[in-house]
Amino acid sequence: MNEWIDDVRKTLKIVTEERDELRSQLVGEGKRIRELDKLVDDMAKTIEGAQARIDELVHENRKLAGNRDLLKKAIRATSVNLRDQFAAAALTGLLARHGDTGSTEPGGKKPYAKIAIKWADAMMEARKEAGDE
């Protein structure tokens, strides 16, 4: 019977050691699981912060795109093209040379504006032929 009790004690000792080893492993795994949970939470917060920043940048980009479109429209509305510049130069020359007619009306004795436009078109055509478009 003593042998049987010794065998039971040995078995109990082995089972207790295995139980303690398993507990130790579980505690280690539990700690690792908590670390992984924290890592996942931190990553989720980082992603949320990044998404918020992306949303801000998208909103800012839309505002800038709207401003850019307004600026393009303003430039187009106020810019003088090359043909207009040629016409202005031609008109200045015509009026300097022939403007002493006494007429201050645009459609006076000679239609200087129409003549200036024809000169501007001729200058544009000459540029095209010269390859200076």
Image: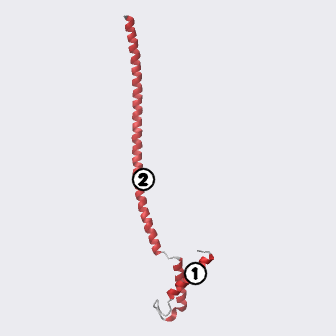
Occupied quadrant, residue 94: bottom right
Q: Alpha-carbon neighbours of circle 1 within 10 Å: few (<14), some, or many (≥20)?
A: some
| Type of amino acid at the residue the image marks with label 2 | Ile
Q: Position of residue 55 (x, y in %)?
A: 40, 54
Asked if 14 appears above or below 98 in the picture, the reply is: above
In the rendered view, tell whether residue 1 sits above or below residue 108. above
Instruction: State the residue in front, 108 or 53.
Output: 108
Residue topped by disc 2: 54
| Distance between the alpha carbons at the discs numbered 2 and 1 | 52 Å
Task: Name the secondary structure under disc 2.
Answer: helix
Viewport quadrant of the C terminus: bottom right
Look at the picture and state if 71 lies above or below 33: below
The three-letter code of the residue at mark 1 reads Met
First along the sequence among labels 2 and 1: 2
Task: Give the residue furthest to the top.
Answer: 1
Residue 91 seen in the figure: no
- In the rendered image, residue 82, in percent from the top left (x then y), is placed at 54, 77
Where is residue 11 drawn, in percent x and y? Answer: 40, 13
Q: Is residue 70 above or below residue 105?
A: above
Q: At 60% from the left edge and 77% from the top edge, which residue is drawn?
A: 127
Residue denoted by label 1: 123
Q: Quadrant of residue 22?
A: top left
Q: Which numbered circle lies on residue 67?
A: none
Q: Residue at x 47, y 72 (%)?
A: 76
Picture coordinates of residue 19 (x, y %)?
Answer: 39, 21
Q: How is the image coloured?
A: secondary structure
Residue 73 seen from this side: yes
- SS category of the residue bearing label 1: helix
